[in-house]
Amino acid sequence: MSAGPIEQELKLVCTPAALDQIAASGVLDPHLVGAPTVAHLVNTYFDTDDLRLARRRASLRVRRSGERRDLTLKCDAPGGPSLDRRSEWEVEITDDSPDLAAFGDPAVHEVVGAILP
């Protein structure tokens, strides 16, 4: 099975005051891609009745931000589960339905076929 793009992220849990301190320190500035923004996101996650995606540590969601909708599939990266590395594919869609045909990457269909035969 071919691997998709690899997502690496760091998630922090902190108080708003601690977040302000981190932002003011400038320690993250070299890693910023653009100016920080605030956005209202609505996420809807999909799975089978028997939770096949969850059991395989995969997720399928539609994220709505304003008028934009994105379909995202995430699963463990090659080499096994990791807290910070996952394969991820994302494509813009026109409605809130998780249409897997919207993904043009054949690797997505390999992943989904292995999980949802």
Image (cartoon, grey):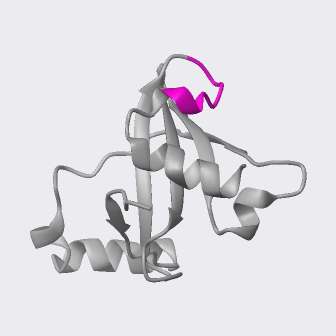
Location of residue 47 with respect to 67 vertically, above or below: below
Instruction: Locate the N terminus by quadrant.
Output: bottom left
Count the labels in the image. Answer: 0
Q: Is residue 31 magenta?
A: no
User: Which residues lie in the magenta part?
Assistant: 95-101
Residue located at (46% from left, 78% from top):
12
- Residue 115 lies, in percent from the top left, at 67, 57
Return the residue found at the far left.
30
Q: Is residue 70 left or right of residue 32?
A: right
- Residue 52 lies, in percent from the top left, at 77, 59
Residue 4: quadrant of the picture: bottom left
Residue located at (50% from left, 80% from top):
14
Residue located at (64% from left, 69% from top):
57
Location of residue 72 with respect to 3 vertically, above or below: above
Q: Nearer the viewer, residue 64 or 117?
A: 117
Q: Is residue 4 left or right of residue 108?
A: left
Location of residue 105 with respect to 102 vertically, above or below: below
Q: Is residue 100 magenta?
A: yes
**Dominant secondary structure of the magenta stretch?**
loop
Residue 25: quadrant of the picture: bottom left
- Residue 55 lies, in percent from the top left, at 75, 69
Q: Nearer the viewer, residue 95 or 35?
A: 95
Residue located at (42% from left, 28% from top):
92
- Residue 15 lies, in percent from the top left, at 52, 77
